[in-house]
Amino acid sequence: MDVFADKLGRIGAWAGQNKYLGAIKNAFQNFMPATIAGAMSVLWTNVLVNDTLVEGNAQGLGGIFSPIMVLEPVNAVFSAIQFCTISCISVGIVMLVAQEIGEANGETGAFPAVVGFMSWAVVTPTAHTITSLASGLTDQAEKAISIGDVLTKNGVTDLSQVGTFTGFNADYLGATGLFTALIIGILALEIYHVFRKMDALKIKMPEQVPPGVTRAFEVLIPTFLTLLVVGMIGWLVQLITGQYINDIIKTAVQEPLTKIIGDNILAVCLMYTLAQMFWLVGIHGQNMISAVKESIFRPMLYANTTAYATHSGKIPHIFNTTMLQMFGEIGGSRVTLGLLIAMGMFAKREDNRAIASLSLVPGLFNINETITFGLPMVLNPILGIPFLIVPAVGLTIGWFLTTIGFCPRVVLEVPWTMPPLLLGFLATGGSIIGAISQLIVIVASTLIYIPFVIAYEKYQNKQSENAML
C-alpha cells in the first residue's frame, strides 16, 4: 500500500506542478462567474419570462403565470448577456489561459492576455462567403425562392458581394472553438516567451523615458514576431490542408476526445475512479483530473446551453461538467452526502456521530473536507471501498436515467456550492425530474454506504478493545 501511495503521490506532484494543466484549470475556474451569469440569463429567457407552448405544454413560467410576460422586453438584455458570456467563451478562455502561461513564465501585467487574444484572432477566419441562402419563401408551385432570385427581380444585378461578410463565425467564438483557444493561448505565449528572453530584440530607451513607454517598446518586437510566427503557422496549415487551423483542431482533437471520453460512460467512470484513488492517498483527486475534465466536458456543457437557449434541436450531450457535479459530486467530490446520511442513521459511536453532525451543513453545500479528513477517509481500509466506487455508480445511474429519457439533459452551469436537489432542478432548466433524479442517486449512495458504516464501527470497536489490552 505504501508503494502504491508513493507512486500516486509522485504523479500527483507532477500534475500539481505542471504549468499547462494548471493554466487550463485556472482559466476555466476564473471564467466561471461569467458562465454562471450566462446560465442565469438563459434561465430568465427560457424558464421565467417565457410563454412558449410545445404540444400544448408551457415551457416557461409565462405559460402558467401570464403577468410575468410584462418583463419580456428585458429579455433582449439577458440574451445579450448570454451571448457575450457563453457564446463568446473562446475569447475569454484564450485570454485567461494566455495570462496564466505568461505569469508562469515570469511576465507581469495584463499584456500576455492581449497577446493571446491577438494570436487567436490572427489564425481565426474573419471573411466568409455565403454560397446559398434560403429566403423561407415559396412560389405558387411550392418551390423554394432563393435570396438571389428575390434580389435579381428587384433590380440587383451584381450578386458577387451579397453573400460576403466580415466577422468571427459563431462556431469559433463558442464552445466548438475552445480547444483552439487553449492550444493557441499556450503556444503563442511560449513563443512570446522565447522572443522575450532575447536581449537583441529589446528596444532600449533612455532612462528618462517613463517605465510604461519603455516596457511598450521592449515588448514591441517580441509581440510582432509572435503574431508573425503564429499567423504563418495558420497560413501554412491552410495552404497544405485547405482547412483553417480552427477546423482541424475541432475535427482532429476536440470531436474525437468528446466521442472517446466525453460521451463514453466507461471512460467517465474510469476517470472518476482514478480521482478517488488519489483522494484515498490524501491527494486532491479533482485537481488531478481538472484539466481533462474542464477541457473536454465544459465545451459539451456550453454546446448544450446554446442548443437549449436557441431552441436549435436536440440537446447534443448527456455528459458535461454540471452533469458530473449533479451525479458524481453530491455533497462534495465523492458523493459523501450518502455517507453522512448513512452515519446519521446507523452510526452509534459518539465520535463518528459528532463528525457526521459537524459535516452535514458543509456537505449540503458540497464541501466535504471535514468528513474526508476528519473520519478520515484517507487510507481507510473499509470506507475506502464505497468511497472508491460510489461516484461511478452515481454517474452510471444518472447516465441511465438520462439515456432512457426520464431525466432531462443538463443544460446550465450551476455554482458548485448549490445544495443537492436544487442543483438538479436548476441544471436541467427548472425540471423537477432533475431534482428527483439526483434524489435517486443520493438514496442509492446511502444504501451502498450503510453496510460499510456498520462494518467500520465494528472495526473501530475492535481496535479500541485491542488498545485497552
Image: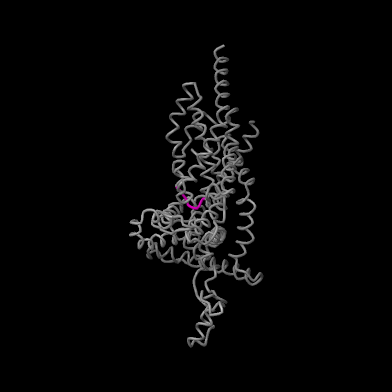
Residue under the point 54% across and 59% down: 178
- Picture quadrant where residue 179 is located: bottom right
Q: Quadrant of the N terminus?
A: top right
Residue under the point 54% across and 79% down: 145
Q: Would you say residue 330 is visible in this rendering? A: yes
Asked whether 131 or 440 is in front, the reply is 440
Residue 318 position within the rendered picture, expressed as x and y whole percent measured from the top left: 57, 51
Residue 197 position within the rendered picture, expressed as x and y whole percent measured from the top left: 53, 59
Q: Quadrant of the C terminus?
A: top right
**Does 274 sit left or right of 202 as displayed?**
right
Image height of 222 relative to 165, above or below: above
Residue under the point 43% across and 30% down: 358
Magenta part, dominant SS: loop
Asked whether 422 or 325 is in front, the reply is 422
Q: Is residue 269 magenta?
A: no
**What residue span does the magenta drawing correspond to?**
410-414
Q: Would you say residue 112 is visible in this rendering? A: no
Image height of 171 relative to 429, above or below: below
Residue 91 position within the rendered picture, expressed as x and y whole percent measured from the top left: 48, 61
Residue 135 position within the rendered picture, expressed as x and y whole percent measured from the top left: 51, 76
Image height of 146 relative to 248, above or below: below
Report the number of numbered marks.
0
**Farthest-out residue, top:** 469
**Does 444 sit left or right of 108 as displayed?**
right
